[in-house]
Image (cartoon, coloured by chain):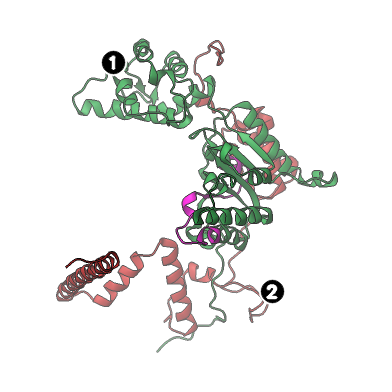
Chain colours: A green, B red
Amino acid sequence: MRRDVNMQPTRLQRKPAEDPIERLKACLGKTADVRSPKDAEEPILDASVRASLFQWMAEIRAADELKSVGVKPRTNALLFGPPGCGKTTLAHHFAARLGLPMVVVGSEHLIAGILGASGQNVAKLFDGLAAAETPVVLFMDEVEAVGASRSGRTGGQCDDEKNSALTVLLRKMEEFNVGYFMAATNLPDGIDPAFWRRFNMQIGIALPGFQERFAIIKRYGMPFAFDDDDLDLLAEATDGASPALLRELMEGVKRTLVVRPRMNMPIDDPCTIFASVLSATMPPPEMEVPKLWRNAETVKGLSAMSWPPQRMGGQA
Amino acid sequence: MTLNNSQARLFSFVQRIETLLEERKGINEGISDIKTEAKAAGFDNKVIMQMIRERAMSQAEREEWQSLCELYRATLGMLDGTPMSDNARRHMSRDEKDDRESGVDDMFDPAPEPEPTASPSEARAQGAEAFRSGKRVTENPFPAGDPARASWDEGWCAEAGSDGMDIPPEWRRSQKKAEKGDEA
């Protein structure tokens, strides 16, 4: 015999998830990726970008004091700069400092093949954010896909579709009041002027300087411990490289150091190791080629490095 | 026979669909064979198909499905004495449509999570302590929007003497060297 269950189950309705990240995932579905604040990486930024970001965070914390003088903290920023310079890392760090989830939207989430669907996707994204009822940092990457200038368009149906998506974005951006909006582009010249103006801040993310390159090379060279003199040499030779390119370079070196002994190939010459990595790693076409990539003499100069690097913890 | 453009396209569509239907038939026959084999080995095909449906779900979807099943069973008196899972309990919440007595906690009301909070000076001191103990600036224990979060961050930055975005020490040069700038 079935036992009577002493309970009052009256509603069989879905309760929104307690965790804001789960709630956002449920509300946004496939229109965006949601990243937790705890997954943010340490940014390596130059002083001017850090100053802008630090002031913005201070404004947000001083919202009440700003209100007393009739102004509000700024709520959005456009980040521009060469590809792979850490725009996403910066946005994630900003979100993590505020303790907010970051909602990452790429062009693949917005642009659709059916007439009218791109604008609908934009609307769906902002409606989903409103429904989740939790503050977020919305990060729209490669925003030129929807925010490109309307003046150069030829008037075809595709252009009409893009115009309509941008119009929806401009309107929804003004209505957006559940957090902070950051957009990133590699092509600032192609951004629509009306879209550009909607941002309270336009922050240029430059290529890393010497000290930043030193840190990036050291970071991605780990667990191999490179001597500081060697890191200086590499930082000098990679002037003009983006963080993403430096990461690719150092990860390539690590792979080669691990794989070559298995292939019965020597790893005792730094020039050979770097030359093999460089031959398969190139900066994007629109960027200036750093010395290490364009000048064979620079690669030969790496023979002065202490080699092979020791693995931290004693393993060779 | 020479086909004009639209005829050729129509033929192409029809033939492609026919090919796929043929493939589907083959696949269905394959599935039937496996089911027969499973049955012969003593397995229950209905349960196998349910497991396949559940495996196709994400963990969140599966938890949702299972908790809804449990709730429905509880409502219909079909739990048969088994306890309700936490996930199922979390699905129930109070709102304006709730006809249960308000203000009385019951098994459907999850205990509210204690929110860490502190006075600005306490939070600032905790932030400073966190820096000294090697915690990252993003490991702030206070929730977003809590004023203590800002104080903790300020305490961390004040103790570090930075904006919290310094290059971490493990990525800086380990030996004392003359400062070298970009112009070098």
| Tag 1 subunit | A
Of residues A247 and B120, the one drawn nearer to the viewer in this rendering: A247
Measured from the top left, where is residue B149 in percent x and y? Answer: 67, 45
Instruction: Bin the neighbour count of mark 1 within 10 Å (Cα to Cα): few under 14, some 14-19, many 20 and up.
Output: some
Circle 2 SS class: loop
Quadrant of image for the N terminus of chain A: bottom left
Q: Is residue A88 above or below residue B63?
A: above
* Highlighted magenta segment, given as a residue range: A92-121
| Nearer to us: label 1 or label 2 | 1
Q: Is residue B155 above or below residue B184?
A: below
What amino acid is at disc 1?
Asp
Q: Which residue is mark 1?
A: A269
Q: CA distance from mark 1 to mark 2?
A: 75 Å
Q: Is residue A209 above or below residue A120?
A: above
Q: Is residue A171 magenta?
A: no
Q: Are marks 1 and 2 in contact (CB under 8 Å)?
A: no
Q: Which residue is mark 2?
A: B103
Measured from the top left, where is residue A38 in percent x and y? Answer: 53, 45
Q: Is residue A289 left or right of residue A162?
A: left
Labels 1 and 2 within one chain: no
Q: Is residue A57 left or right of residue A10?
A: right
